[in-house]
Image: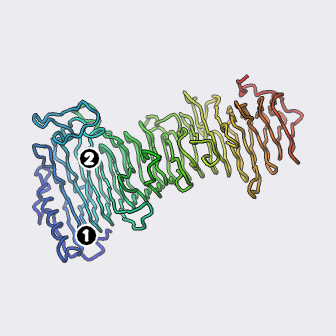
Amino acid sequence: MTQAQTAPVALRKDLKKDFGAVGDGRTNDQPAFAKAADFFNKRATTAGGTARAMLTIPKGIYVVGQQTPQGETPDVLRLMNCRNLAIEGEDSATTEIRYASGLRYGAFDPTTRQPYEAPTAMFTDGKYAAGLGTCIVLQGCEDIQVSNLTINGNSPHLLIGGHWGDTGIQLAADGVFISDSRKITLRNLSLHHMGRDGVQVLNHLAKSLNDPQRENIVFENSTCLYNGRQGLSLTGVNGFRAVKCRFNHTGRVLMPATGKPLFSNPGAGLDLEPQDGFVTNVSLENCQFVDNAGQGIVSDRPSLSQPASTKNIAVAGSLIWGVTNWSTWVTQPGFLFKNCFIYGAFVHGCQAATAAEATRFVGCTFEDRPYHGQAAYGPFTLHSDSYAKRMSFTDCRFVGTHNYLMHAIPATTDSASAFHLRNCTFLYNYTQPPQGSYDKLLGAVLSGNTIFKNGRQSTSNHRTAFMLGNSADKSMVVRAPGTLQFLAPNCYYLLVGGLDVGRLEGGAHGSASVTVAADNALVLNESPGRVPELYIGPTSRLIVKKGGSLEVLRHTKVSIAGQLIIEDGAYFFRDPLAEVSIIGGGKLQVGPQAIKTKHPKLYSTYY
């Protein structure tokens, strides 16, 4: 039940009875909406104009869109400075606002009115512009509810012109546009086949990144499907919540006349892109961002020299599925993903200056799961190549079914930039070998229980290579208390910068352990200009099980303050030019039946 239904209504108006709409799917009802907008806008200036009112839209199909010869199309229902108003359809399945067929959208020659394709990439000559306006505009409004409606942009039946703007067609053709408004609720809406966005919110009410005055924009139980540029654009807002909404299939409408999709960059399910303002305190709960031509979610920071303009962005319990593009592209600060399913590659992460700015994941699953038989996008489930800092993963799973798991390299090699993983699981779920690359996790701190193992569907016996660490000091760290277990067979882990197991610093306590199971090889490799070190702390241990392998190559160092245990039947290769030292009560235990050579299948090939 909406707020409008629970509060007393001082004034009720009916779009058909009071403003002359027909709703028969043939008559153009734009004049009726214009009359309704004029009535409520004038009422807003009267003494009693803030008492609660309701505009009901009975079931029917209301055709809109009246375009001038010059290509100008006015907004359908433009409300300005209105208060306490509910706009309610009977039901989104039976109450539809539909744009007329044959409207022009894009660049057209002003004389011939034929589609015009400009020779330059950037084209903004207004004489050539043919836009569609916006269906519902809320400008300077407060306490408005819009519910139980379908807004159909009818894009397959538009006449598409040439590009206009910087890319694609950047002209108005939106379902709902919210500007400088507060306490707005959009509920049970279907916004589809719009030329541009399903919904855009562009508020400039917040005075700073930490402005305490929330705007309370709510979007519930709604869908934004098959739109041309975005399902949802958040270009300025402080306080936005979307619950049980779908932002899918952006840029997927194939236009019959051109044979090409109607697509304008970014073409995302959701774009969080502050425009001369801020996007803060955003919550997206139990939503979908699936099969968009652009990214499922995108939030790109144009330059690190610009001050931060996003903060406290939480995505929870949501499905993000990239099929022909990245599932998620985030470089802006302040993003938290919690209990999300991320299918297709996540890319980048924030180059965070503080922990609060860092991109964080809690309870998320990263997987290259196919979409209706089509492979998920990207060679990895996570792709962050020398860009992000401080990115963290807690209780996350990385599942490879066709592609590799991750390409994760922090922006710099200092310890503050390292990625942090706690209680994470890496699952190799391959039925055939992935092609073209290998896994990298360079510069990470591991805590809790970290496990590499096979998934339930794994049948491939290919050799998996995983590069761990880099040339920075302590680049791969297993923090106490914590465990690291290499359990999946036929896996080769190359330590290019060393491994630190359970170093107790700054009053830390507890123990750490590393287990190398059968048919796993852990290789400490030389690095030009330095001596990589395998360090085992005083309360910690590294165990190589029967059939497992530890290789210590030349110009490397092993420091044992705890225990290094090589079981009977395990492989242990130590190059004569490698240094092994015992610290304090440390112990090197090599079983009498240990095999002092490289693993016969998982050996290094460096010399």
Q: Is residue 436 visible?
A: yes
SS class of the residue under badge 1? strand
The structure residue drawn at horizontal position 25% and vertical position 60%, both measured from the top left corner, is 138
Q: Residues within 10 Å of mark 2 (few under 14, many from 20)?
A: many
Give the image quarter of residue 547: top right
Relative vertical location of residue 393 with respect to residue 489 in this rendering, above or below: below
* Percent of width and height locating residue 394: 60, 52
Q: Quadrant of the C terminus?
A: top right
The structure residue drawn at horizontal position 26% and vertical position 59%, both measured from the top left corner, is 91
Q: Earlier in the sequence, mark 1 or mark 2?
A: 1
| Kind of residue indicated by mark 1 | Arg
Relative vertical location of residue 460 with respect to residue 588 in this rendering, above or below: above
Q: Which residue is mark 1?
A: 83
Alpha-carbon distance for marks 1 and 2?
27 Å
SS class of the residue under badge 2? loop
The structure residue drawn at horizontal position 20% and vertical position 53%, both measured from the top left corner, is 97
Give the image quarter of residue 507: bottom right
- In-front residue for pair 256/61: 256
